Image (cartoon, rainbow, N blue to C red):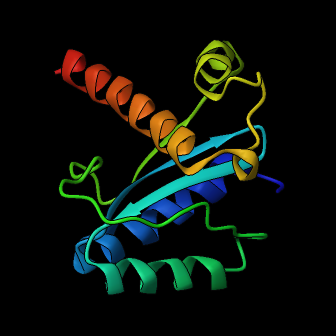
Amino acid sequence: MADLPATVADVLRSSRPNNARANVTGMLLTFGGFFLQALEGPDERVRTTLRRVAADPRHTEVKLLGADFCSARAFGRWAMCANDLSAADDDILKVLDGRGEFVPYQMTTAAALKLLTSIAAIHARQTEAAV
């Protein structure tokens, strides 16, 4: 992808209002050319959002790692929160992924969710500290 940051910004500009209208929240992580995303909300609305993501030409090789029902949202603060890790954050990925490289389609559902919730917690703390 030629200009990844611009593409991610464009995706967020459209996904945030769409997700808010659909009552879908989530987290998007980009690193090393890969994307990892969690969507949460009413089942059919999440499925509709996933179909829209898969049909979007900005996305290729969309793979579903897992689907589950939960009693509470992990990313309820955000219609879509995005975080782009820098090379300085490799240690986070090494600890949470256990393999030392970020290859989302090789992650288990539990590992992917743990990574995203950990990054979301870091993002929330940074946001709260800035206020």
Q: Quadrant of the C terminus?
A: top left
In the picture, measured across the screen, residue 5 lies left or right of residue 60, that is left
In the rendered view, tell whether residue 69 sits above or below residue 6: below
**Where in the figure is residue 86, as x and y percent of width and height?**
65, 24
Q: Nearer the viewer, residue 68 or 120?
A: 68
In the rendered view, tell whether residue 85 sits above or below residue 49: above
In the picture, measured across the screen, residue 128 lies left or right of residue 52, that is left
The image quadrant of residue 98 is top right
Which residue lies at the image location 65% right of the left edge and 28% below the top edge?
97
Which residue lies at the image location 71% right of the left edge and 19% below the top edge?
87
* In the image, farthest residue toward the right: 2
Q: Nearer the viewer, residue 117 or 77?
A: 117
**How many numbered dots are placed on residues in this image?**
0
Which residue lies at the image location 27% right of the left edge and 69% below the top edge?
41
Which residue lies at the image location 27% right of the left edge and 80% below the top edge?
22
Q: Quadrant of the N terminus?
A: bottom right
The image quadrant of residue 54 is bottom right
**Where in the figure is residue 47, as x and y percent of width and height?**
44, 82
**Where in the figure is residue 53, as x and y percent of width and height?**
57, 76
In the rendered view, tell whether residue 116 sits above or below residue 86: below
In the rendered view, tell whether residue 65 sits above or below residue 36: below
Q: Nearer the viewer, residue 27 or 94?
A: 94
**Where in the figure is residue 24, as x and y percent of width and height?**
30, 69
